[in-house]
Image (tube, grey):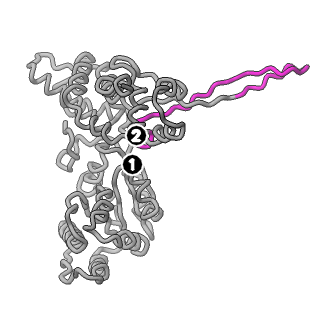
Amino acid sequence: YVVGKPLTPASESLYMGREDVFMWIEENLLGKTQPHTLILYGQRRMGKTSTLYQLVGGKRGHTIREYPGYPIFPVYIDLQRLAGCDTYEFFARLSQQIVRNLAKRNINVQMPTQLSQNGSLFHEFDMFLDEVEGKLPENGLLVLVIDELEQLQDSVERGRLTQDIFPYLRSLMQHRSRLTFILAGTNQLVEDYWSIIFHVGISREIMPLTRADTENLIREPVSPMIHYDDLAVDRIWLATRGHPYFSQLICHRLISEVNLEGRRTKEITIADVRQTMKHIVMEDDSHLQHLWNESSDDERHVMAALAGSPDRGHEPVARSEIVTRLRDVSFSDLSFDSALTKLERRGLLHRTIVEREIKRRLVESTGWQPTLVSKDSSYSLSFDLLRSWIAQKHPLGSLLK
């Protein structure tokens, strides 16, 4: 198991699922006269970077890269590594990445030698792209795969990059038929960048793994040496609901404890999972703490109201019941609804629509009984490990005090 690091092509045997994402990428890139700009967004540590790695260099992306008649040439750009660059250095290093990646596919392009630090920088980079496109095979497509897109806005706000970079990138997306982009970032990406960039592209959220893919992630890396019984798998699924980072974390801790104890019988039970979850809640909670730190006070109150006690609280809670639990918190209905919406958008909250039938007899000779449907929403935290951690570390009573 790999915890906290993106899965590179070297560890792609641990990369499970996402067939729908690769199919979506293929459908929107290949054979298009004007390929779409694609946006992948989702929670942190949900597998976005691992997916990009597989697309750029892994077996899972091979059929897309080498699609007959429409080869693509993806270039991975991690904006965190370019965080300290000024505009000149940004485009110089971007050019360098393009040259290096194309060389791996036997396409030789010269680095631009005249990238200036004045107003002609964008024009000179355009000339470099003209040369790149001229070297691509027929119907070939250069794809700039830009990860951690939020870093771009941060660099602009810090004055490292010119604010003109956004309209320039938008121009590239709109007017170059042999260049397109795949952009990746957190859920906040949709809100912050829609008016700037997203109206020229289409987006897709990277969701948690399915139940079947989560089970494969649990069992396959250690099979046949170690066996998980079915109840143990069920408990891990309930704890993580397919969140790949937390699934890897629980399994890694389980295997470490099995090896440390030197068991003869290499079987993992539900009791082992419960014990490991307790250890994670108490000791190995850095990402859980990060999720909490990123939340507003209103969001924290809502999550604490949903968490219940450490050992109880799996059931969804009606909106009216949440309000009752938070009766001592002074915030408006607007703030409350905003907190619910933001938590759901961040993937920390799951909402269920509950319909209730209400029969009413009218005083008529026909005895007609129309049925009225009342709709309400119930909420629960997205995965039980988060719920258990909040109930243990930040119970509602402590917050209210």
On the image, the x and y values in percent for residue 288 come to: 28, 35
Give the numbered dot on residue 187: 1
Which quadrant would residue 401 be assigned to in this image?
A: top left
On the image, the x and y values in percent for residue 399 come to: 36, 28
Residue tagged 2: 347
Whether label 2 touches label 1, CB < 8 Å: yes
Above or below: residue 15 compared with residue 113: above
Q: Nearer the viewer, residue 206 or 59?
A: 206
Measuring 18% from the left and 68% from the top, which residue is drawn there? 100
Q: Amino acid at mark 1?
A: Asn
Which quadrant would residue 128 be assigned to in this image?
A: bottom left
Residue 320 belongs to the span the image colors magenta? no
Q: Amino acid at mark 2?
A: Gly
Measuring 43% from the left and 72% from the top, which residue is drawn there? 174
Q: Nearer the viewer, residue 160 or 149?
A: 160
Residue 179 visible in the displayed image = no
Counting other residues with Cα less than 10 Å from the Cα at mark 1, is it few (<14), some (14-19), or many (20 or more)?
some
Above or below: residue 338 compared with residue 124: above
Q: Quadrant of the N terminus?
A: top left
Above or below: residue 24 compared with residue 356: below
Q: Nearer the viewer, residue 82 or 96?
A: 82
Callout 2: SS: loop
Measuring 43% from the left and 35% from the top, which residue is drawn there? 349
User: Which range is magenta?
Assistant: 344-372
Callout 1: SS: loop
Residue 345 belongs to the span the image colors magenta? yes
Counting other residues with Cα less than 10 Å from the Cα at mark 2, is it few (<14), some (14-19), or many (20 or more)?
some
Measuring 30% from the left and 74% from the top, which residue is drawn there? 137
Residue 119 visible in the displayed image = yes
